[in-house]
Image (cartoon, grey):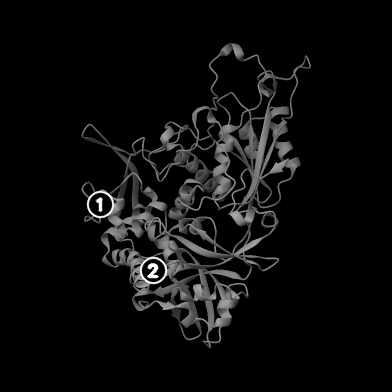
Amino acid sequence: MTTALNNLTLDFMQSEKGKHSNYKLNAILGIKYNHLNKYSHNFLVQFQNIKTNFVETVEVAPELLRYKFKIGNIYKEGKFVNKDTNQFEKYLEIDTSKMKEQIPLYKVLSKDSIKSILGESEFNAFKFGSNYCYVHENEEERYVIPSYIVALYYYFRSSSMKEALYKSNPFNLCDRKNSNLTDKSNAILVLESNASKLDGPFIYRFLTNEISQKGFIDFSRSISSFKNKMDMANKVTNIIPITALFPTRETFNIKIRYLEIKDTLSNKKTYLVNEIQNDDSTLDFEKLTVLKKKRKDSEIDADGEDKLNIKGRKPRKRKTNVVTRTPSLIYGTHTIKELENNQNLSLLNKDITYGLLEEKGGNISITTGEEKKGEISVSFSKGISSGDETAQQTKLENDDENKNNISKPPMFDIFLESIEFIENSNIVSEFLYDDIPKNIPVSYTKNNEIISSCMINNRIKQYVSCSFEYNDTRIVLLEVESDNNDFATWVISSEKTILEEDIVKILEMRYSEQKLLETIKDEYNNLNSLKFNTHRHAQINDENEHEEVLERWVLRLLHKVSNS
């Protein structure tokens, strides 16, 4: 049976009717005030059933909207289905020094425009229209940039930044005593263990730039101010309109995903911005060392997932619904952020080093290192790309040599842990996992016996596979059982459809024809037809850092495919 590995979904998407329907995320309606914890507010959003037009208004964590659910996209059972074909992407030059005023959406867009944005529904028109926005315009066109789009891109990069934002204090994320924020040519930022180190360059801006700090503090103050206003009127605070400042006042470019809308309030062409994907705003440093305090065993690491069971490589239990709080622990957002940072125009030509800082007995130890052939660093984000073809031994826990003659079932737990990050990363589509192990093609000796390289545990080796699409490239990962050092996950990629016969042919070359992996790579080296490569397993040396290692495995895999 071919099936998805996980089925993470919002509650309404797993109802008897909902699980068979496609839903479009139409809009963000505002902040849903949390009366139980004023430092943890979610966003209220509107999904719409594509077939029935029925509206679902649900509460979702802002980080989830940044990494998992995107405005305008269509989802089924929590999984991405496709994009709105009416959306476009471009780079837009803006001058935020002239965009100081935030205007309610209902003053910028007509009622009919708001109704069309909400899927011809008036149900949430008042909530949506109460949110604020910026307007960037020229002689012929205007771009409406909702403040919630600014908030998601610049402020809600992680759960730790969200908490600091709601507490109105960016300095909660860092150790000011051990940091050196004043020397822009060689700045040092020491982050607390709950912070995400990949946020470091952007946290630095909030700590050192007066305008950025104001935006950080004003966001929280706008919530408390609205709450106080409602209290004075003896009203219950439910939904709070979103306001958010750009963190710099300058002329720079933003890469946007946008939608053209017809609006009677203006004679100009009007576009609604649904996402900021990249920008080249100023990060005012030349060299920055980001050191994250190594967490204690009792703490939760913002870059880690302590619920993942590493001992014995046993797969963790699957959750059936989305946890709307601290989603970074579920969706592998560390991987997405690292991909974002690699492409971020603000970080271009910046010298950034990531590392760990550990204090033992009053002594401070700083750990930075590079990846070496055959192993993966668990404490340093920069790595060398060489050595991916080098195989990494997969050793399952079994020290009893006397059990070698016993036939055992196939074990693919490390592979399952790894591809789970791919599926949940929200950067691939059409993910499928074939969960039935299959026998590999075999070769025979002169005595008509199967050769030893095709056998394991007294039986024929088996394999499993998964497939997905990334940046218009089809990818198949094959995992064959192995107890030797010459093995890694096999990566088959193509710009065209990869057929089952292509997979079988490669397996036959390796096992029936006994050809070396390098020979197969030489024969299949064209992405236009078919390309074959290998990607070594992640080496987990520290249980506390296992998620970072697995996510880096995914990052290197996608980097390898995109640079084929």
Q: Going 56% across and 48% down the picture, which residue do you hit?
A: 424
Residue 394 horizontal/vertical position (percent) = 55, 28
Mark carried by residue 186: 1
Which residue is rendered at x = 44% and y = 53% of the image? 342
Circle 1 SS class: loop
Would residue 269 appear left or right of 5 to someone viewing this image? left
Give the amino acid at mark 2. Answer: Ala
**Foreground: 94 or 416?**
416
The three-letter code of the residue at mark 1 reads: Asn
Q: Position of residue 292 (x, y in %)?
A: 33, 44
Q: Quarter-wise, where is residue 153 in the image?
A: bottom left
Q: Residues within 10 Å of mark 1 (few under 14, many from 20)?
A: some
Disc 2 element: loop
Q: Residue extending furthest top?
A: 402
Which residue is disc 2 drawn over? 244
433 vs 7, nearest the viewer? 7
Report the label total: 2
Which comes before the other along the chain, label 2 or label 1? Answer: 1
Residue 528 in sight here: yes
Q: CA distance from mark 2 to mark 1?
A: 30 Å
191 relative position to 11: left or right: left
Examine the rendered structure and indicate whether residue 263 appears above or below residue 31: below
Q: Is residue 116 above or below residue 14?
A: below
